[in-house]
Image (spheres, rainbow, N blue to C red):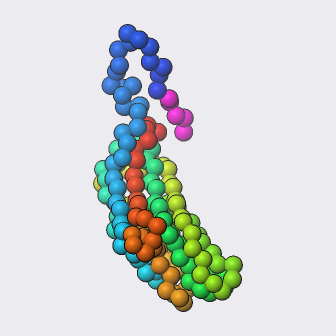
Amino acid sequence: MAIAPNTTFVSGAILTAAQQNAFGFGIVGRAVSSTDYTLTTSSVIATGMTVTFTAIANRFYKVTYFEPQVQTNNTLNAQTNTQIKLTSAAGTLLSQGYLQTGQANYNTGTLNLVHTGTFTAGSVTVVGCALSSSVSGSPVLGRGAAGAGNSLLLVEDVGPA
């Protein structure tokens, strides 16, 4: 898919609607959560991580899901997984990231997922999901007081496809 960049602007030129539409439209949806989320072994929408927006045909969207503090369980080779999905926890997987333990100890890190692509025109819902391979030791997504800040699910229109 070829991308047509915007034109070079010169003094005195007339700015057209087509040129304006070649710019990204910016943020079209955002969700923030400061509530800790205790993980389960099923892929579930993490607290507060749902964004619904109106997609425009033939435009690229960038979806970013950030968890500031992801804690694993205390099992050898255990995984904590965050995911960006379309529509619901059972929806199409758009992106995912893992944090894995190398020994039978807790591990804490940050996960930042990004998906770029087009969507069918109309109402679109994206969700941030999470799960752990085991709940031994109560793995959690630490946010707010217990964590390093808020989680974020952000959708941006970055320009024409």
Q: Residue furthest right?
A: 102
Q: Report the side of 71 relative to 128 (left or right).
A: right
Residue 50 is situated, as x and y percent measured from the top left of the image, at 35, 64
> On the picture, is 146 further left or further right than 133?
left
Quadrant of the image for the N terminus?
A: top right
**Spot occupied by residue 140 in the image (x, y as percentages of width and height):** 47, 78
Q: Is residue 69 above or below residue 40?
A: above
Relative vertical location of residue 146 with respect to residue 134 in this rendering, above or below: above
Would you say residue 75 is visible in this rendering?
yes
Query: Magenta span: helix, strand or loop, mainly?
Result: loop
Residue occupying the point 34% across, 55% down = 30
Name which residue lies at 69% across and 78% down: 102
In terms of depth relative to the viewer, which is nearer, 100 or 128? 100
Q: Is residue 128 left or right of residue 71?
A: left
Residue range highlighted in magenta: 1-5
Q: Identify the residue at image location x=33%, y=48%.
A: 28
Residue 48 location (% of width, % of height) = 34, 68
Kindly tell me whether residue 127 is visible in this rendering: no
- From the top left corner, tell me how far across and down residue 133 is, in percent: 56, 82
54 sits to left or right of 155: left
Classify residue 73 by image quadrant: bottom right
Q: Residue furthest bottom?
A: 136
**Residue at 55% in and 86% down:** 134
- Asked if the stretch drawn in magenta spans residue 133, the answer is no
Q: How many marks?
A: 0
